[in-house]
Amino acid sequence: MSEIKDILDIEQERSEPKDWQVINLFQEDSFYRAYEVSAWLCHTYIS
């Protein structure tokens, strides 16, 4: 399981336009969770 600081660092490293097309999923126990920009991308394009 990733620490929240590590997750936020990964989400804030988006510098190039292609990085804004990537959804990062982080495994927490038996499920996956998206944070920050990844959560927004999931909501916008998958729902």
Image (cartoon, rainbow, N blue to C red):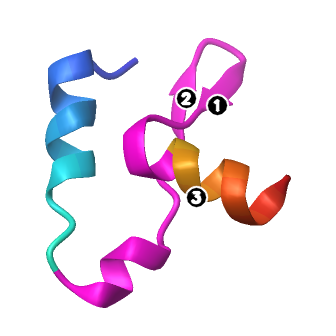
Q: Residues within 10 Å of mark 2 (few under 14, many from 20)?
A: few
Point out the image quarter for the N terminus: top left
What secondary structure is found at the residue carrying circle 3? helix
How far separated are the C-alphas under marks 3 and 1? Answer: 15 Å
In the rendered image, residue 35, in percent from the top left (x then y), is placed at 45, 35
Specify whether 19 is left or right of 41. Answer: left
Q: Is residue 27 magenta?
A: yes
Q: Residue at x 85, y 52 (%)?
A: 47
Asked if 22 appears above or below 27 in the picture, the reply is below
What secondary structure is found at the residue carrying circle 1? strand
Q: Residues within 10 Å of mark 3 (few under 14, many from 20)?
A: some
Q: Which of the pair 17/5 is nearer the observer? A: 17
Q: Which of the pair 1/34 is nearer the observer? A: 34
Give residue 32's mark. 1
Label 2 or label 3, whichever comes before in sequence order: 2
Specify whether 23 is left or right of 44. Answer: left
Residue linked to disc 3: 41
The reply to whether dot 1 and dot 2 touch (C-beta < 8 Å) is yes
Name the image quarter holding residue 7: top left
Name the image quarter holding residue 27: top right
In the rendered image, residue 16, in percent from the top left (x then y), is placed at 20, 84
In the rendered image, residue 10, in percent from the top left (x then y), is placed at 22, 47
Residue linked to disc 2: 27
Q: Residues within 10 Å of mark 1 (few under 14, many from 20)?
A: few
How far separated are the C-alphas under marks 1 and 2? Answer: 4 Å
Q: Which of the pair 35/29 is nearer the observer? A: 35
Residue extent of the magenta highlight: 16-38
Q: Residue at x 33, y 76 (%)?
A: 19
Q: Amino acid at mark 3?
A: Leu
In the picture as drawn, the residue positioned furthest to the right comes out as 47
The nearer-to-camera label among 2 and 3 is 3
